[in-house]
């Protein structure tokens, strides 16, 4: 039996209050002369039922009657015709803290408000501690609520409604108030209520939340119920039917359809949505706040069957976000620029691409991996890839049986400080997310007036899955049980699938002008494969040099050659190539000496050389109980290097094998051109 | 099929009023307490003011009417003292404060009414409840004052004020419901109510004895005297005084009209209110 029955209801309002007509200069005279202002039909002939435990979303443009419908279910007002039956107690979160009296204490207001929602005192007593706990108000509970901040007001209001244990919850846009932490809490609580089998009716503009929270969605338009369907279909329908409005444009080509809708780009392939939640959108950071693109006022300036240009204006950010979106075959080009009429405070910019959780494998340049599952306790995003890295080619591979195409993306941007990462979103959003960040200006600096091209994102839906997987594994070298994977300036090593390197892996660093330039910080922009040989080229963002890393199999070991290409004459104070191993490695050995690594206690705040004498040598070897032996070998005939062992600081807690080169006096001078930086190999052998 | 917890079909059924009010009795009490607590919350003497205020008023009036105005009525041979005036005043204030508060109550609680669904009757009723508490305080002070001033005042017949009070309460509830609903549609009602109450104060035997009215009006036309009693407060105040000072059950002839009036106005008020309750939120 349904818990809510809405039977053919119509609701009309008079556009007046009392006798006095509020529209125009009506008054007693126009009333006497029989002038009546028109009636407004908020809802007409709406019927549906909600089963117990169902969560129903109501979506629609402003003024489509969503809130009226909620009020009718709440019994705030009665329909003009038709019937509403609710078989259970209703708590409406129409407005948090409605009915709070500012002079009463929080405690008194909790009882009063719960009473208004239909609870008896004894029932409130039972949940009072939970309410207090959820609200986080603490001792303020016995202060009058007019001493509360607006955040506390909302928190206690939500807590009361959320714990009064009604059968039906009506939620109207409440999730748009309060800080992020509180919103997360609210979402979690709503999730719990749903698990508890409560019936939820939910009104929101945030299609993402509606999509994840609701089982069924009603779409209203101008008071009429257009459709009642699964969230996905209702949202699709919504995005399509409003396609003629000013911020919305739809394009289709081949099997792909793209909908640009008020600060979002949604992608469909064979009528399946590839994106999810807020789809592809962007956010700008200005004066301490992030501003989401859907908060802006969007207008499509140019419309074409396969191309459009949309402008988004924020009320609180100087500058216009310009999106050019073009669809060609199954490839979408999304170019983002920022037009500033005057100097602007925009410091950072992000593009966020949210995809269906049915994508299970990510590709990030030439790396690949499987997403972890998104669990109900995930309140935060879970990074899959370190957020500081740079990536130009990313991809997604759907799980078996998901009717979704593989996604290939390429990101182009001129900004020097651009980074990208893959992440799982929080549970409520429930998406795979690719976020691309660009630093436009340092804090306190202004972005100059004019047009700034920020980034171009190309999304391709017709790349075969195999090509993507191949791309993801291209930087990996398998030499027997030894696996070596190049990850932007470092090599991670595995032996029989077990990771043996620590977080820094194998990397190189050179000291120029008293600044260490780690290989991970270079811009690794090109990659070639020459037979068995992998060649990577990275350029420094700071100094005029490039590094070329060449990896190749060498008699069961990993051969490494590193070349330094000075673009201008360069003075290097010293440089090294290091293998950073797990802490469990406890013994070291080199040409003429051996010893044990000391413990790294909390007092170790600096890196410490372990061997007293670090004369030039041929090899550095580390062993540990049950661990494969790792040997860093250099070729002294080609380039003499000092072999040394280092304990890192307590925070990193790792062992380092290092091939160091430092001059006797002054600096190493590199003329313009290519110079050998390191030549040797890393061997990994069975545990001794 | 079981009974729905809420259905709009019930919203305007008058017979649902009583069960719904029983269901929300705690809320009604909460709202009454809220009003009382809020009124004196930030005063350092707090709730004491609820007693001090009427006490002070009574003392001033006793002084004024005993020593300055008492003479005139004595001359005409009618006994009328300060305690009689206070009795009339307490009864009148019960009516006037509750009616004027109830009339505005829906508008004042617009925040609640437009956001939460609950039996709307609770709102005007809670203001009547607050007035009842004030009436109880005023009545108690009056009794104490009378005991002090009048010899042999305390007498079991005081219990006879109870039926009179009940009739007045019924009338107040009826008027409160009717006027609050009317005021939601026509905001002029609140102002008209104030004007009528001001008129009613002088049209009721509060600061003058009913004997004086009889003397004056019966001489002119006995019908006028009957018309005077069309004001239910005339009968009620006279009945209060009979119960308090004449130590007798109030004259049924005097109480008959107020009783009929009260019952009719209650039915009318409850009916009108119920009929407009479902869409009250749209008018506020």
Image: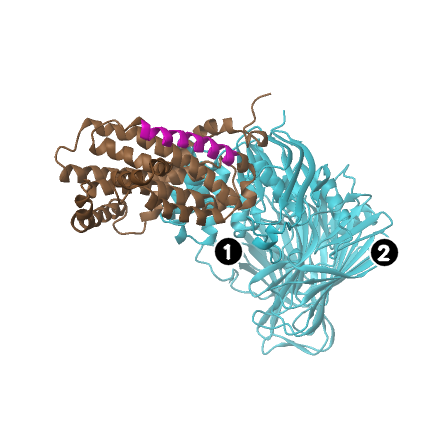
Chain colours: A cyan, B brown
Residue pointed to by mark 2: A305
Q: Which residue is drawn at 51% across and 48% down?
A: A182
Pointer 2 indicates a residue of which chain? A
The answer to whether residue A184 is left or right of residue A59 is left
Disc 1 on helix, strand or loop? loop
Extreme residue in the left direction:
B151
What crowding class fits label 2: few (fewer than 14 Cα within 10 Å), some (14-19), or many (20 or more)?
Answer: few
Relative to A583, is A217 above or below? above
Relative to B184, is A588 above or below? below
Q: Does the magenta-highlighted stretch encompass residue B171?
A: no
The answer to whether residue A575 is left or right of residue B177 is right
Between residues B59 and A393, which one lies in front from this camera angle? B59
Between residues A541 and A28, which one lies in front from this camera angle? A28
Task: Tell me which numbered mark, 2 or 1, is placed earlier along the sequence.
Answer: 2
Q: Quadrant of residue B134?
A: top left
Q: Is residue A373 visible?
A: no
Quadrant where the N terminus of chain B lies? top right
Marks 2 and 1 on same chain: yes
| CA distance separating discs 2 and 1 | 56 Å
Between residues B102 and A590, which one lies in front from this camera angle? B102
Where residue A416 appears, as percent x and y from the top left, is: 68, 68
Residue pointed to by mark 1: A651
Residue range corresponding to the magenta coloring:
B253-274
Where residue A316 appears, as percent x and y from the top left, is: 60, 64
Extreme residue in the top direction:
B1
Q: Can residue A262 be seen in this view?
A: yes
The answer to whether residue B44 is left or right of residue B115 is left
Q: Does the magenta-highlighted stretch encompass residue B267?
A: yes
Q: Nearer the viewer, mark 2 or mark 1?
A: 2
Q: Residue at x 47, y 43 (%)?
A: B106
Pointer 1 indicates a residue of which chain? A
């Amino acid at each position: 039996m349904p818990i809510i029955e809405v039977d053919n209801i119509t609701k009309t309002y008079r556009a007046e209050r009392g006798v006095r007509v509020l529209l125009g200069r009506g008054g007693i005279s126009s009333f006497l002369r029989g002038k009546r202002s028109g009636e407004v039909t908020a809802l007409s002939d709406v019927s549906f039922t909600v089963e117990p435990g169902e969560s129903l979303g109501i979506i629609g443009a402003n003024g489509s009657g969503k809130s009226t419908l909620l009020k009718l279910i709440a019994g705030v007002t009665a329909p003009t015709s038709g019937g509403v039956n609710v078989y259970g107690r209703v708590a409406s979160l129409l407005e948090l803290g409605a009915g709070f009296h500012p002079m009463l204490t929080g405690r008194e207001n909790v009882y009063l408000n719960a009473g208004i929602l239909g609870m008896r005192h004894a029932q409130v007593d039972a949940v009072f501690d939970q309410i207090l706990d959820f609200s986080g108000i603490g001792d303020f509970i016995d202060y009058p609520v007019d001493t509360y901040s607006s955040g506390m007001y909302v928190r206690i209001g939500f807590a009361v409604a959320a714990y009064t244990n009604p059968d039906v919850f009506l939620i109207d846009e409440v999730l748009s108030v309060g800080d992020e932490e509180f919103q997360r809490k609210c979402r979690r609580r709503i999730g719990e209520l749903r698990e508890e089998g409560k019936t939820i009716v939910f009104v929101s503009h945030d299609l993402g939340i509606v999509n994840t929270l609701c089982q069924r969605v009603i779409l209203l338009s101008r008071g009429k119920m257009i459709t009642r369907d699964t969230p996905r279909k209702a949202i699709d329908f919504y995005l399509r039917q409003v396609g003629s409005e000013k911020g919305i444009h739809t394009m289709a080509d081949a099997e792909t359809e793209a909908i640009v809708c008020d600060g979002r780009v949604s992608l469909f392939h064979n009528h399946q949505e590839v994106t999810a939640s807020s789809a592809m959108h962007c956010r700008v950071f200005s004066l301490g706040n992030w501003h989401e693109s859907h908060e802006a006022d969007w207008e499509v300036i140019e419309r074409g069957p396969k191309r459009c240009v949309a402008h988004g204006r924020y009320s609180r950010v100087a500058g216009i976000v310009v999106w050019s979106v073009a669809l060609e075959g199954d490839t979408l080009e999304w170019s983002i620029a920022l037009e500033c009429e005057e100097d602007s405070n925009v410091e950072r910019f992000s593009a966020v691409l949210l995809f269906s959780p049915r994508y299970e494998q990510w590709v990030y340049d030439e790396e690949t991996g499987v997403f972890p599952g998104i669990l109900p306790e995930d309140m935060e995003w879970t990074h899959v890839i370190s957020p500081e890295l740079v990536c130009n080619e990313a991809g997604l591979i759907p799980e078996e049986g998901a009717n979704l195409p593989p996604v290939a993306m390429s990101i182009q941007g001129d900004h020097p400080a651009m980074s990208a990462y893959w992440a799982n979103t929080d549970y409520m959003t429930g998406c795979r997310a690719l976020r691309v960040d660009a630093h436009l200006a340092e804090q306190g600096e202004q972005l100059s007036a004019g047009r700034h091209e920020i980034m171009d994102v190309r999304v391709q839906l017709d790349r075969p899955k195999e090509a993507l997987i191949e791309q993801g594994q291209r930087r990996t070298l398998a030499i027997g049980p030894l696996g070596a994977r190049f990850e932007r300036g470092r090599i991670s090593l595995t032996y029989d699938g077990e990771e043996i390197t620590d977080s820094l892996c194998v990397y190189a660093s050179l000291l120029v002008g008293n600044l260490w330039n780690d290989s991970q910080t270079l811009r690794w922009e090109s990659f070639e494969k020459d037979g068995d040989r992998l060649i990577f080229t990275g350029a420094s963002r700071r100094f005029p040099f490039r590094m070329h890393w060449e990896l190749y199999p060498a008699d069961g070991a990993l051969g490494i050659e590193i070349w330094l290409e000075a673009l201008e004459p360069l003075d290097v104070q010293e440089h090294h190539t290091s293998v950073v191993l797990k802490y469990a490695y406890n013994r070291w050995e080199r040409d003429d000496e051996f010893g044990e690594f000391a413990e790294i206690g909390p007092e170790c705040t600096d890196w410490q050389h372990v061997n007293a004498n670090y004369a030039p040598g041929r090899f550095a070897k580390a062993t540990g109980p049950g661990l494969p032996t790792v040997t860093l070998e250099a070729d002294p005939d080609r380039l003499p290097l000092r072999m040394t062992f280092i304990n890192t600081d307590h925070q990193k807690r790792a062992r380092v094998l290092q091939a160091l080169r430092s001059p006797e006096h002054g600096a190493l001078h590199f003329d313009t051109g290519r110079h050998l930086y390191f030549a040797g190999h890393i061997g990994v052998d069975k545990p001794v | 099929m079981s009974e729905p917890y809420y259905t709009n079909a019930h919203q305007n059924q008058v017979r649902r009023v009583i069960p719904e009010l029983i269901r929300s009795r705690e809320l009604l009490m909460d709202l009454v307490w809220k009003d009382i607590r809020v009124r004196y919350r930030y005063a350092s003497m707090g709730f004491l003011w609820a007693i001090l205020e009427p006490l002070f008023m009574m003392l001033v009036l006793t002084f004024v009417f005993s020593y300055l105005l008492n003479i005139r009525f004595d001359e005409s041979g009618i006994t009328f003292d300060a305690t009689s005036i206070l009795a009339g005043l307490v009864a009148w204030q019960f009516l006037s404060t509750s009616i004027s508060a109830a009339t505005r109550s829906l508008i004042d609680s617009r925040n609640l009414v437009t956001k939460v669904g609950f039996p709307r009757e609770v709102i005007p009723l809670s203001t009547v409840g607050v007035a009842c508490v004030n009436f109880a305080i005023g009545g108690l002070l009056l009794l104490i004052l009378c005991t002090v001033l009048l010899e042999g005042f305390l007498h079991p017949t005081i219990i006879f004020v109870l039926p009179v009070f009940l009739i007045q309460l019924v009338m107040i509830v009826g008027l409160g419901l009717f006027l609050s609903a009317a005021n939601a549609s026509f905001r002029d009602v609140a102002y008209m109510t104030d004007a009528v109450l001001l008129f009613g104060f002088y049209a009721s035997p509060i600061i003058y004895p009913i004997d004086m009215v009889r003397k004056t009006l019966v001489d002119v036309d006995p019908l006028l005297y009957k018309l005077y009693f069309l004001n239910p407060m005339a009968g009620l105040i006279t009945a209060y005084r009979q119960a308090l000072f004449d130590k007798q059950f109030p004259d049924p002839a005097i109480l008959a009209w107020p009783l009929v009036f009260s019952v009719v106005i209650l039915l009318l008020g409850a009916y009108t209110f119920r009929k407009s309750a479902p869409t009250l939120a749209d008018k506020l």
